Amino acid sequence: MFWALIGIILGIFVGLALNFPIPLELTKYSAVVIMGILDALFGAIRAEVTKDQFNAIIFITGLLFNVILSIAITLLGDKLGLELYLAATFVFTLRIFSNVGITRRAVLQNILQSDKKKETHEES
Protein backbone atom coordinates (compact mmCIF):
# COMPACT_ATOMS: atom_id res chain seq x y z
CA MET A 1 0.00 0.00 0.00
CA PHE A 2 2.86 2.35 0.87
CA TRP A 3 4.55 1.84 -2.50
CA ALA A 4 1.27 2.36 -4.34
CA LEU A 5 0.79 5.74 -2.66
CA ILE A 6 4.39 6.71 -3.44
CA GLY A 7 3.83 5.73 -7.08
CA ILE A 8 0.62 7.74 -7.31
CA ILE A 9 2.20 10.84 -5.78
CA LEU A 10 5.29 10.50 -7.97
CA GLY A 11 3.13 10.04 -11.06
CA ILE A 12 1.13 13.17 -10.28
CA PHE A 13 4.29 15.24 -9.85
CA VAL A 14 5.83 13.89 -13.07
CA GLY A 15 2.59 14.51 -14.95
CA LEU A 16 2.40 18.08 -13.73
CA ALA A 17 6.08 18.73 -14.45
CA LEU A 18 5.95 17.41 -18.03
CA ASN A 19 2.93 19.52 -19.01
CA PHE A 20 2.06 17.16 -21.87
CA PRO A 21 -0.76 18.63 -23.99
CA ILE A 22 -3.63 16.28 -24.82
CA PRO A 23 -5.06 16.77 -28.34
CA LEU A 24 -8.67 17.91 -28.34
CA GLU A 25 -9.83 14.77 -30.18
CA LEU A 26 -8.48 12.56 -27.40
CA THR A 27 -9.86 14.39 -24.36
CA LYS A 28 -12.90 12.11 -24.11
CA TYR A 29 -10.71 9.03 -24.26
CA SER A 30 -8.22 10.33 -21.72
CA ALA A 31 -11.09 11.25 -19.38
CA VAL A 32 -12.61 7.75 -19.41
CA VAL A 33 -9.18 6.11 -19.09
CA ILE A 34 -8.36 8.25 -16.05
CA MET A 35 -11.75 7.46 -14.51
CA GLY A 36 -11.23 3.73 -15.16
CA ILE A 37 -7.83 3.86 -13.49
CA LEU A 38 -9.20 5.78 -10.50
CA ASP A 39 -12.04 3.26 -10.17
CA ALA A 40 -9.58 0.38 -10.06
CA LEU A 41 -7.34 2.19 -7.56
CA PHE A 42 -10.17 3.03 -5.18
CA GLY A 43 -11.43 -0.55 -5.49
CA ALA A 44 -7.98 -1.82 -4.51
CA ILE A 45 -7.83 0.58 -1.57
CA ARG A 46 -11.27 -0.60 -0.45
CA ALA A 47 -10.18 -4.23 -0.68
CA GLU A 48 -7.08 -3.47 1.40
CA VAL A 49 -8.91 -1.49 4.09
CA THR A 50 -11.92 -3.79 4.44
CA LYS A 51 -9.71 -6.88 4.69
CA ASP A 52 -11.16 -8.38 1.52
CA GLN A 53 -8.77 -10.57 -0.39
CA PHE A 54 -6.69 -8.26 -2.55
CA ASN A 55 -5.24 -10.07 -5.53
CA ALA A 56 -2.82 -8.30 -7.86
CA ILE A 57 -3.94 -10.37 -10.87
CA ILE A 58 -7.57 -9.42 -10.29
CA PHE A 59 -6.52 -5.79 -9.89
CA ILE A 60 -4.52 -5.72 -13.14
CA THR A 61 -7.17 -7.53 -15.17
CA GLY A 62 -9.92 -5.32 -13.73
CA LEU A 63 -7.90 -2.22 -14.54
CA LEU A 64 -7.29 -3.36 -18.12
CA PHE A 65 -10.92 -4.40 -18.55
CA ASN A 66 -12.16 -1.01 -17.25
CA VAL A 67 -9.85 0.89 -19.59
CA ILE A 68 -10.55 -1.23 -22.68
CA LEU A 69 -14.32 -1.26 -22.13
CA SER A 70 -14.49 2.49 -21.51
CA ILE A 71 -12.44 3.19 -24.65
CA ALA A 72 -14.70 0.85 -26.66
CA ILE A 73 -17.84 2.58 -25.36
CA THR A 74 -16.38 5.99 -26.17
CA LEU A 75 -15.34 4.85 -29.65
CA LEU A 76 -18.80 3.41 -30.30
CA GLY A 77 -20.34 6.69 -29.19
CA ASP A 78 -18.07 8.62 -31.55
CA LYS A 79 -19.07 6.36 -34.45
CA LEU A 80 -22.78 6.77 -33.63
CA GLY A 81 -22.52 10.50 -32.96
CA LEU A 82 -23.51 10.05 -29.31
CA GLU A 83 -21.74 11.17 -26.15
CA LEU A 84 -21.55 7.66 -24.65
CA TYR A 85 -18.36 8.53 -22.78
CA LEU A 86 -20.62 10.37 -20.33
CA ALA A 87 -22.28 7.08 -19.41
CA ALA A 88 -18.92 5.45 -18.68
CA THR A 89 -17.83 8.48 -16.67
CA PHE A 90 -21.09 8.42 -14.71
CA VAL A 91 -20.76 4.73 -13.85
CA PHE A 92 -17.12 5.10 -12.82
CA THR A 93 -18.02 8.08 -10.65
CA LEU A 94 -20.76 6.11 -8.88
CA ARG A 95 -18.37 3.23 -8.26
CA ILE A 96 -15.64 5.55 -6.97
CA PHE A 97 -18.03 7.21 -4.51
CA SER A 98 -19.30 3.80 -3.40
CA ASN A 99 -15.75 2.54 -2.80
CA VAL A 100 -14.80 5.73 -0.93
CA GLY A 101 -17.89 5.40 1.27
CA ILE A 102 -17.15 1.77 2.09
CA THR A 103 -13.50 2.63 2.79
CA ARG A 104 -14.48 5.52 5.05
CA ARG A 105 -16.86 3.32 7.07
CA ALA A 106 -14.25 0.59 7.42
CA VAL A 107 -11.57 3.04 8.58
CA LEU A 108 -13.94 4.62 11.11
CA GLN A 109 -14.99 1.19 12.42
CA ASN A 110 -11.33 0.21 12.84
CA ILE A 111 -10.65 3.44 14.74
CA LEU A 112 -13.70 2.98 16.98
CA GLN A 113 -12.79 -0.66 17.67
CA SER A 114 -9.23 0.26 18.59
CA ASP A 115 -10.56 2.98 20.93
CA LYS A 116 -12.87 0.44 22.62
CA LYS A 117 -9.97 -1.98 23.04
CA LYS A 118 -7.88 0.76 24.66
CA GLU A 119 -10.73 1.67 27.04
CA THR A 120 -11.30 -1.95 28.12
CA HIS A 121 -7.56 -2.50 28.51
CA GLU A 122 -7.21 0.62 30.69
CA GLU A 123 -10.15 -0.43 32.91
CA SER A 124 -8.65 -3.82 33.71
Image (tube, rainbow, N blue to C red):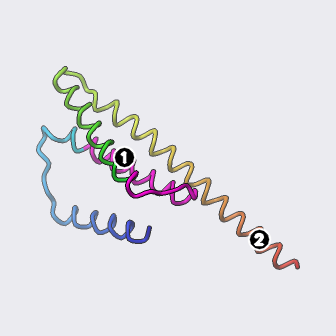
Q: Nearer the viewer, residue 62 or 96?
A: 62
**Left or right placement of residue 67 versus residue 119 in this view:** left
Disc sitting over residue 98 in the figure: none
Of the residues under marks 2 and 1, which one precedes in the sequence?
1
Most common SS among magenta residues: helix
Residue positioned 23% across, 33% down in the render? 72
On whether residue 59 falls in the magenta region, the answer is no
Q: Secondary structure at mark 1?
A: helix
Q: Is residue 19 above or below residue 80?
A: below
Extent of the magenta region = 31-58
Q: Position of residue 97 (x, y in %)?
A: 48, 44
Total marks shown come to 2
The N terminus sits in image quarter? bottom left
In the picture of the structure, the residue carrying the numbered disc 2 is: 117
Q: Quadrant of residue 36?
A: top left
Q: Secondary structure at mark 2?
A: helix
Q: Quadrant of residue 120?
A: bottom right
**Left or right placement of residue 122 versus residue 113 in this view:** right
Q: Position of residue 81 (x, y in %)?
A: 18, 21
Label 1 environment density (alpha carbons within 10 Å; few <14, some 14–19, many ≥20): some
Of the residues tagged 2 and 1, which is closer to the observer?
1
Q: Residue furthest top?
A: 80
Residue type (three-letter) at the residue carrying disc 1? Gly
The C terminus sits in image quarter? bottom right
Label 2 environment density (alpha carbons within 10 Å; few <14, some 14–19, many ≥20): few
Q: Quadrant of residue 119?
A: bottom right
Q: Nearer the viewer, residue 74 or 57?
A: 57
Q: Position of residue 50 (x, y in %)?
A: 58, 56
Disc sitting over residue 62 in the figure: 1
